[in-house]
Amino acid sequence: MTADSSAQIPSIVLPTARQRRRGMLLILVLALAIFCWQLGSTGLVDETPPLFAASGRAMAETGDWLTPRVNGLPRFDKPPLVYWLMGLGYALPAGTFWDPLGTWAARLPSALASVLTMLALGDTLLRYPLQGDSFPRRTAIASALAFALSPLVLIWSRTAVSDSLLTGTLALSLLCQWRCYASGSGRRWWLAWIVLAFAVLTKGPVAVVLTGITLMLFALIRRDLSGLWASLRPLQGLLITGLISLPWYAAELLVEGQPFWDSFFGYHNLQRLTSVVNDHLQPWWFFGPVLVVASFPFTPLLLFGLGKLIADFSRGASMRRIPNRDSLNHFAGCWLLAVFLLFTAAATKLPSYWLPATPAAALVIASTALPPSLQQRKGLLVAWCSTALCTAILAAGLLASPLWIPLIQDPEMPTLPAELMASGLVIRAAVCFIVAVLLGTRFFWGAVPGRLLAWQGPMVLFQLIALVPMIQLGDRVRQLPVREVAKQVVEQRRPGEPLAMIGVLKPSLHFYTGQVVVYEGQSRWALVNLSDRLSSERRRGFKGVPRTSLGASPSVLVVIDKLTAAKQHWQGLNPQRLSSEGIYELWRLDRSQLDQRAADLQADKFLPSWRVPRPERY
C-alpha cells in the first residue's frame, strides 16, 4: 500500500455505550417496522405455509408437542422448533380476537428471527467496527438494512415456514463464533453452540454442515486453525449442541420408528442433496442468478466487496498478519461461500436455500464503507453507478407497468391485473425507487455508509407503503375465496360428513376449516381414489366408512374448482351446489352417484392409486 492511500484511511472510532444503545434502538425500530407491520393482516399463501401453521396449531390444541401433524398425518418435513414457536403463539388466550386469520402466530417466528438477525449484525459492527471505518454506527445500520431489504428476506420473513428461523439461528451462532475468536478471550464460547442447537432443531443437520464448512474455509485462509480451535472448542461445543438437539430426534425415532427415519433423514435430507425431489431440478449455476436477485439493487456493491475479498484471499500469507478483530469481512466471505458450495453441490435447488447467506452478503455490502485504495476507487465508482442503473431500471419497469401487468394470466387470480392497475401501488413503488436514486446521487460524494443509508431509506418506505399493500391485494384476490368457501364448509357440513377438495389443492382449506380434507387432483384416477378413500382410508381424525355401513354419511362435501368441474368424468353427478366463491364451488355429492361413477371407471382400467406411498402428503 502506498503512503498516499494509507494516509487516507481514517482510524477506527469506537462508539460510546450511549451511541451503541441509540444505534441498536434505531435498528430495532426499523426491524419491527419492516417485518412486523401488518404481519397478520393477510391469510396464509398456499401451499407450504398452511402445512406449517396447521402443524403448530395442532400441537397447541392436542398437547402433542413431540410429533408435528397436519391433516391427520405426521409431518416429518422439518424438526420441531418452528412448530413449537408457532404452537406457543396459538396457545395464547383469545387468539380469535387478536389473530382472527390465525396468521400472526404462524408468521411471528420468521419475523422475530429476522429482527434478531438485524440486531446481531448491528451489534457486531458497533462492537467490532470494520478496519478504517470512522462511521461505525452508520455502517451498522446500513448493514442491518442491507440484510432486511434483500428481496428474499422481505418475502420469507413474512412467510410461515422455517427458512427465516434457520437463517436467524445460524447467523447468531456464526456471529457468536467469530466474536469469540475476535475477542481472543474465548469467553462465552459455549453460547454459539447452544444457538447452533436451535438451528439443528429448526432444519436438521444442514446447520452443522454449513457451520463446519464456514469454519474450515476461515481456518484455511487465516492459517490459524490452532487459534480458532482454542477459541471455539469445537469438540465440547458439538457435544453441547448434541445434548440439546438430539433428544427430540431420539424420542421421535423411538415413537414413530422407521417412517420418521425414512422420511426425515432419507427423503428430506439425504435425498434432497443427492437427487431431485418435487421436480426442483435446476442447473449447477442456479445460485449465481439467485445471488444477483437476493441483493438487488445493491448487487454491484456486493460484487465489488466480493472482488476485494478475492484479492485479499489471493495474497494468502498476508492474511495471518491481519488482527483477529479485523477479520469479520473475511469471515463473511467464507460464510457466503459455504452456502454457495453446499447448495450448488445439492441436487435439489430452491431460491430459499440462499437465505442463510443473506446476513453474510449484508456484511460484505457494508464493507464498501471502507475507504478504497487508489486502485479500488474506479471499481467502487463503477459499483455505485451500476447500483444507480439497477435501481433506475427497476423504477422504469414499474412505470411501464401498463404494458406488462395485463399480460399476467393466473386462473386463480383472474381479476389481479385490473385491481393492481387500479390500486396505483405499482406507481407508488416506482416513486420510492426514483427517490432512492435521487438521494443516493445527491449524497454520492459523501461518506459511503451515509450514501448507502440515503439509498435504503426510500426502500424502507417502499416496504411499508407499497409492498405490504400489494401483498394484501394479492391475498384478497387469491386467498379470500378459499377462506370464504371454508366458512361455507363450516356452516354447511353435517355431523360425520367427510370433506374433499378436488382439482386445485389448497392446504389452507384444512387450516381454516379445522377438518381433515381428502385431497385429489383432476384426473379419472382422482375420482376413483376419492370413492375408495371415503370407504377405507384411516388417519387421525378421519376414518373412511363404506357407504352401506351403519352410520355412514350418505354424502360428501366437495370443494372443486370450476375448470375441474367442467371435465367430463366430473359431469352428470347431480351435485347440490351450496356455494360459489371465486373459482371454487362447494358441492354436496351423493356418495352413491360417486361410487357408481368410480365403478364405471374401474371397469375401464382406472384403478385406485392412493395406497402407493408418497414421501410428502397432506
Image (spheres, rainbow, N blue to C red):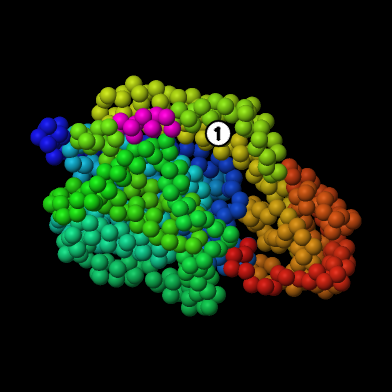
Q: Identify which residue, 584 or 388, lies in the foreground.
A: 388
Residue occupied by mark 1: 469
Q: Which amino acid type is marked by label 1?
A: Pro
Q: Position of residue 362 (x, y in %)?
A: 34, 43
Say whether residue 384 is magenta: yes
**Quadrant the C terminus occupies:** bottom right
**Can you tell which quarter of the image residue 406 is in?**
top right
Is residue 58 visible to the viewer in this orientation of the structure? no
In percent of the image, x 65 and y 42: which residue is there?
A: 478
Q: Position of residue 73 (x, y in %)?
A: 61, 67
Q: Is residue 36 left or right of residue 62?
A: left
**Quadrant the N terminus occupies:** top left
Q: Position of residue 13 (x, y in %)?
A: 16, 36
Check the image and report above or below for 105 versus 455.
below
Q: Residues within 10 Å of mark 1 (few under 14, many from 20)?
A: some
In percent of the image, x 52 and y 51: which residue is there?
A: 160
In percent of the image, x 25 and y 69: which residue is there?
A: 236
Q: Which residues are magenta?
A: 380-390
The local secondary structure at tag 1 comes to helix
Check the image and report above or below for 82 versus 205.
above
